[in-house]
Structures are given as structure tokens and as C-alpha cells.
Amino acid sequence: MKKFAVIVAGGIGTRMQSELPKQFLEIHSTPIIIHTINKFLGICDQIILVLPKEFIEYWQTLQERYFPNTTIIVTAGGSTRTQSVKNGLLQINEQEGLVAIHDAARPFVSRQHINQCYTAAQETGSGVLAVPLKDSIRKLEANGSVQCDRSQYMLVQTPQTFQLSILRNAYKEVLGEFTDDASLVEANGHIVTLVVGTYENIKITTPEDLILGEAILKFQSSNS
């Protein structure tokens, strides 16, 4: 089955306190989005990049520098993540295949885990990267909070990978907003298969994450 990747960078990253969207900020002198795309090159057959409309021209200068001979389809994002993913899916012409939805601001995902998600999706319909909780958690209630068994919960990451027909059908039926694609697919009647990932696969969201990101990239480089 053909493999597709929709890399979502439709937001402007207000929590980063930067005029430049977080996906264009640099780690080790290279934009985050470049690190992310490099992880998918050679694994998938087609990459679709979803960007804020006003930064598509900015991206084109980066592509000329980093990927002059690579075909990357670019489309504008919507006002929400759900709409941005829908816009990305519209760029895929094939009826069947496997599609990974990935946050542009997660540049540290391993190629091994990307492949494992594709394999799980081919075998079961979905493959969603997640990690066990490390901290204790409590559930808020009207009169305070109660302890929860953290072994019963997972932190969901991306990529979230699906058979193309399953994800397309889920987006046709979408009502309201979902925080991730797995929730939408589950709401459409499908069981979600989890693939255990690593804690390195952080999402760059705040200025503190850039500091952590520098350390992770240095660690990964020393062990590659």
C-alpha cells in the first residue's frame, strides 16, 4: 500500500511568544520543520505539508534551500486542526493507502516508530504512537480531586497513522472539533491500535521546549 504523510503546521504557535511560527524556529541551526520532514523522507511515497496561508511563500524559500529536488505538496491550513487535516487529505488522489498525520513541531520522532505505525495501520487499520505516564495523576471532581491509576492511561503523540479509507470516512462524518485523529476515528466506530513510542518525541510548544529540544537532538546525534 502507498504511504502518505500529512505534516500539520497550520497554527501560528502563540504560546511560543514568537512572531515566527514555532515550526520555523531553529534547533541546531536548522528549522524544526526541516528536522521533521527529514524523518519521513524515504519512508513514505508522498509528503503533504499543511501551513498557515501567510507563510507558504516563506516555506518555499526553505524548500529551495533544503529540498530543491524533492516534491512536497503544500496546502493552506484551516482555522482549526481538524480543518487543516481535512485540507491535507484533499491533496491525496489515491483511493487506498496508508496515511500518517504528524505534528510539524514533533521533530524527534524516530524513523523506526514511523515504520511501526505504518505497519500497525496496514494490519489493524490504525497505528497511533503513545507513551505510558511517568507522573502520578488526579481527576478533578466537584469537591476536589481523586487519585487515578496511571497504568490505565497513555499519553498520545503523533504520528497517528490509518488506512486512508478509514480516516477519510471519519472526516466525512465529523461533527465538532476533535483534539486528535485517533479520537475522531474512534468516534466513527473503529478501535485504535497504540504503538509504544519514546519520551523523546516531544512537541515543541513553549520556549522551554526549545531548550529541551536542543538536548534531545544532541543526544540523538551522539547515538546515531
Image: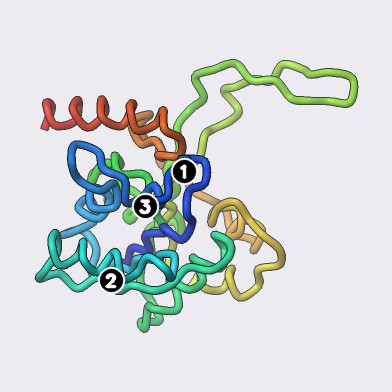
Which residue occupies 57% across, 23% down? 151
The local secondary structure at tag 3 comes to: loop
Q: Which mark is residue 194?
A: 1
Residue type, numbered disc 2 = Lys
Q: Distance from label 3 to label 2 (Cα)? A: 21 Å
Q: Is there CB contact under 8 Å for labels 2 and 1?
A: no
Where residue 210 appears, as percent x and y from the top left, is 34, 33
Instruction: Return the disc, 2 or 1, that comes first in the chain's sequence.
Output: 2
> How many neighbours does mark 2 have within 10 angstroms: few (below 14), some (14-19), or many (20 or more)?
few
Where on the picture, by quarter, is residue 40?
bottom left
Residue 96: % across, % down: 38, 77
Q: Which residue reaches farthest right? A: 143
**Side (left or right) of 182 relative to 49:** right
Q: Can you identify the residue that label 2 sits on?
A: 2
Residue to which mark 3 is pinned: 104
Q: Could you tell which of marks 3 and 2 lies nearer the N-terminus?
A: 2
Q: Say whether marks 3 and 1 touch (CB < 8 Å).
A: no
Marks 3 & 2, CB-CB < 8 Å contact: no
The mark total stands at 3
Q: Nearer the viewer, residue 25 or 33?
A: 25
Q: Is residue 57 left or right of residue 179?
A: left
Structural distance between the alpha carbons of marks 2 and 1: 21 Å
Q: Residue 139 in the image: state x and y as whole percent.
A: 74, 25
Q: Closer to the observer: label 3 or label 2?
A: 3
Q: Nearer the viewer, residue 155 or 209?
A: 209
